[in-house]
């Protein structure tokens, strides 16, 4: 039985300063599942995630489309209602752990703020919960960690703090925007395992944004392939890897190293495929 | 806890000034207004004919220079603290709102700042003094009215930079309200800048007070201020140069100390506040 749809992005068109960045984006994330959003840099992945969070840049305009979260229309939500939702029901794991924490606030404050606001915990209760959370992401000596400042922590430690913080209020949806891109390879693996572990534990739905098909193959129940602000193909993970339909998906697969076929030579995405995509984008833009 | 030479110097001078200002009555060896017409133009103690009764000599009415300098520090310190605080609060609040909320708030504040800065500051303070009458309050008001724009512009620009930082996005994604992000997340990041601006402003305020006293627009004439001492000393610069030099040294020292204090405090707190630039 397939779980119900939790996040439903439907025909979303967004432009920034008059330039289209999302072109009819539709995708669904089901309760407790991980949906991958894959595409190269500039494809519009971050924009899609930001649209869900209601944090599009000032110059951005939503031209049409809907984003429903558990039936609620996120695009027409009032500021108050959105503040109540963010952090509690929808959380973000940011791309760059080095800049995502406030440099002048102690680690404790940054986790405790959300807990107190959303779960109504008092100071002590929130601190106790924060210690548990840091333990859950396998950080040593959580008590003293709470009193430290971000610059005293390594990138991997910070990302663990941010992961702990994202899962702190047991959100139903976590948006992970390239959560491991800024990290060392070894730390990347640990962080991925951690996200997976917490996701299973809390049955959280995750929109996992990445440019790395290899990561998606291991992690995701469904996959959306994105290019030029368009979703080219959105299907179950197995289908997409076994029988990719879109030429770009096939090209992307051929360009990604695979564990099951280590001997394969990698072929970069051909200019021909990219030219075709650009043509389609031009046709689309002319029609809108 | 190690204190850098800069911070030590700045802190030392300002703590000393505050001490002198509050304890002037007990510390000054003479009454600053007491005239001794038998002892006019007494040279400083280390020069020929100087006595240890008047360490820095006496002026044209035989008043003790050292005592007048010490009493003059009261005006300098009062003006520096009050004017810098008021200008700082006014400019910072407006700068924070303009930088963070943008839109029409920013447009209105920026427009006012532009118009404000088009007035020549000296003219503005003289007009103010003419309207309000001479006095300490006039000096303070003149400094606040002129210098709040300095805080406003710099704070606005810094807040706009801070606002685009990732930690603000993080705060938004955990559902903090804009007001809470401004006061709880952005403001602490602006504090090092505010410290620097504030200490610079203290130095500026001391100079402006001296200029206005020199022009006779500050406190009533016979009260000792550094500016009025320079003004009086100027007439006798050939006979007794120290009359003019002594208060000038005080002013220069205060300004240097203000800058050193600002730099020292920033360096002191920067390891803690180390910014990660993206
Ligand atoms: N703040 C912004 N203002 C204007 N355009 C932007 C901004 N951020 C991204 N873009 C544009 O939007 C498009 C999609 O960017 P983004 O969503 O960041 O891509 P991705 O995350 O897939 O690398 C790009 O063409 C980029 O140039
Ligand atoms: Mg991105």
Image: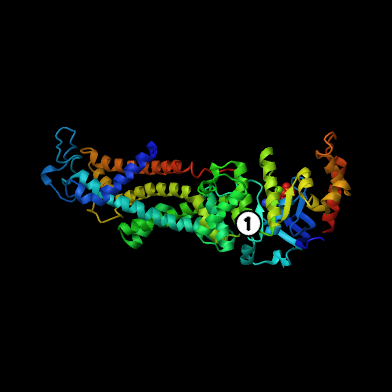
Looking at the image, residue A203 sits to the left or right of residue B59; the answer is: right
- Say which quarter of the image contains residue A207: bottom right
- Say which quarter of the image contains residue A59: bottom right
**Foreground of the two, A92 or B192:** A92
Quadrant where the image shows the C terminus of chain B: top right
Q: Residue at x 54, y 43 (%)?
A: A151
**Foreground of the two, B264 or B21:** B264
Q: Residue at x 62, y 51 (%)?
A: A164
Q: Vertical placement of A137 versus B94: above or below?
A: above
Helix, strand or loop at disc 1?
helix
**Foreground of the two, A264 or A23:** A264
Looking at the image, residue B13 sits to the left or right of residue A124; the answer is: left
One can see residue B173 in this view:
yes
Quadrant where the image shows the N terminus of chain B: top left
Looking at the image, residue A162 sits to the left or right of residue B182; the answer is: right
- At label 1, counting other C-alpha atoms closer than 10 Å, the crowd grade (few under 14, some 14-19, many 20 or more) is many
Query: Which chain contains the residue that carries disc 1?
Result: B
Residue denoted by label 1: B173
Q: Residue at x 71, y 59 (%)?
A: A61
Where residue B223 appears, as percent x and y from the top left, is 23, 53
Where residue A19 appears, as percent x and y from the top left, is 75, 54
**Foreground of the two, B118 or A9:** A9
Where residue A169 appears, as percent x and y from the top left, is 62, 59
């Amino acid at each position: 039985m397939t779980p119900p749809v939790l996040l439903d992005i439907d025909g979303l068109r967004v432009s920034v300063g008059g330039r289209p960045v999302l072109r009819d984006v539709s995708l669904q994330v089901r309760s407790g599942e991980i949906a991958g959003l894959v595409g190269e840099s500039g494809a519009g992945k971050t924009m899609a995630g930001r649209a869900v969070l209601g944090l599009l840049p000032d110059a951005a305009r939503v031209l049409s489309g809907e984003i429903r979260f558990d039936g609620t229309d996120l695009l027409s939500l009032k500021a108050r209602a959105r503040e109540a939702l963010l952090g509690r029901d929808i959380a973000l794991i940011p791309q760059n752990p080095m800049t995502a924490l406030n440099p002048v606030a102690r680690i404790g404050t940054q986790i405790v703020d959300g807990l107190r606001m959303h779960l109504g915990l008092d100071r002590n209760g929130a601190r106790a919960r924060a210690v548990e959370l840091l333990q859950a992401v396998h950080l040593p000596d959580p008590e003293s960690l709470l009193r430290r400042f971000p610059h005293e922590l390594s990138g991997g430690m910070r990302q663990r703090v941010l992961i702990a913080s994202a899962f702190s209020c047991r959100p139903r949806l976590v948006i992970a925007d390239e959560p491991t891109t800024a990290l060392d390879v070894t730390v990347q693996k640990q962080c991925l395992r951690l996200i997976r572990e917490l996701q299973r534990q809390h049955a959280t739905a995750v929109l996992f944004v990445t440019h790395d098909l290899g990561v998606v193959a291991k992690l995701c129940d469904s996959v959306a392939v994105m290019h030029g602000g368009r979703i080219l193909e959105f299907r179950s993970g197995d289908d997409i890897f076994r029988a990719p339909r879109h030429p770009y998906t096939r090209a992307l697969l051929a360009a990604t190293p695979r564990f099951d076929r280590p001997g394969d030579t990698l072929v970069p995405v051909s200019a021909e495929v990219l030219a075709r995509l650009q043509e389609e984008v031009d046709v689309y833009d002319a029609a809108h | 806890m190690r204190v850098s030479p800069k911070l030590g110097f700045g802190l030392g001078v300002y703590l000393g000034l505050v001490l002198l200002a509050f304890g002037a009555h007990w510390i000054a060896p003479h009454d600053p207004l007491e005239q001794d017409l038998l002892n006019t133009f007494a040279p400083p103690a280390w020069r020929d004919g100087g006595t240890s009764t008047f360490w820095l000599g006496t002026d044209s009415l035989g008043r003790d220079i050292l005592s007048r300098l010490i009493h003059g520090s009261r005006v300098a310190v009062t003006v520096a603290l009050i004017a810098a605080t008021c200008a700082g609060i006014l400019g910072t609040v407006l700068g924070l709102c303009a930088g963070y909320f943008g839109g029409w708030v920013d447009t209105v504040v920026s427009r006012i700042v532009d118009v404000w800065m088009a007035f020549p500051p000296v003219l503005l303070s003289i007009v103010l003094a003419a309207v309000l009458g001479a006095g300490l309050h006039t000096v303070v008001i003149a400094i606040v009215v002129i210098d709040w724009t300095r805080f406003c512009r710099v704070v606005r620009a810094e807040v706009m930079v801070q606002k685009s930082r990732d930690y603000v996005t993080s705060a938004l994604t955990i559902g903090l309200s804009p007001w809470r992000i401004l006061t709880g997340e952005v403001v602490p990041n602006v504090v090092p800048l505010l410290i620097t601006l504030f200490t610079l402003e203290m130095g500026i305020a001391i100079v402006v007070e001296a200029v206005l006293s020199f022009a006779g627009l500050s406190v009533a004439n016979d009260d000792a201020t550094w500016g009025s001492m320079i003004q009086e000393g100027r007439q006798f610069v050939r006979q007794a140069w120290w009359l003019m030099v002594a208060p000038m040294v005080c002013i220069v020292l205060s300004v240097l100390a203000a800058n050193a204090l600002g730099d020292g405090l920033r360096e002191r707190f920067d390891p803690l506040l180390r910014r990660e630039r993206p």
